Image (spheres, rainbow, N blue to C red):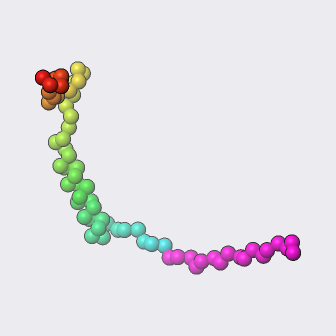
């Protein structure tokens, strides 16, 4: 009645073949490199210009008003 159950031995799966890494000649690699290059060129002109006193442009905000005025 109080016997220990037998533990089944785990089956070892066959070793899978390693997947070859992509090469530079793959179309996906070339397209990805092209997209990265285009994003870098597009973001080249987008900078925030600051000085030691802060931003060079003033913020586009409205003055606060009281409700009903």
Q: Is residue 23 above or below residue 38?
A: below
Can you see residue 30? yes
- Spot the residue most to the left: 69
> Residue 50: which quarter of the image?
top left
Q: Is residue 57 magenta?
A: no
Please name the residue shown 18% across and 25% down the image.
67
In-image side of 50 versus 3 (left or right): left
The magenta stretch spans which residues?
1-17
Residue 3, percent from left and from top: 85, 73
**Prevalent SS, magenta region:** loop
- Spot the residue most to the top: 53
Can you see residue 58? no
Please name the residue shown 24% across and 21% down the image.
52
Please name the residue shown 23% across and 24% down the image.
54
> Residue 6: which quarter of the image?
bottom right
Please name the residue shown 27% across and 59% down the image.
33
- Indicate the quadrant containing the C terminus: top left, top right, bottom left or bottom right: top left
Q: Does the magenta stretch include residue 8?
A: yes
Closer to the camera, 9 or 3?
Answer: 3
- Indicate the quadrant containing the N terminus: top left, top right, bottom left or bottom right: bottom right
Closer to the camera, 62 or 47?
Answer: 62
In-image side of 18 versus 66 (left or right): right
Residue 49, percent from left and from top: 19, 31
User: How many circles with numbers are drawn on the protein?
Assistant: 0
């Amino acid at each position: 009645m109080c016997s220990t159950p037998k533990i089944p031995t785990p089956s070892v799966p066959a070793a899978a073949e390693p997947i070859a890494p992509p090469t530079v000649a793959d179309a996906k690699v070339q397209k990805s490199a092209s997209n990265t290059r285009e994003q870098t060129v597009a973001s080249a002109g987008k900078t925030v210009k600051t000085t030691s006193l802060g931003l060079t442009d003033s913020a586009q905000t409205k003055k606060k008003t009281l409700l009903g005025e």
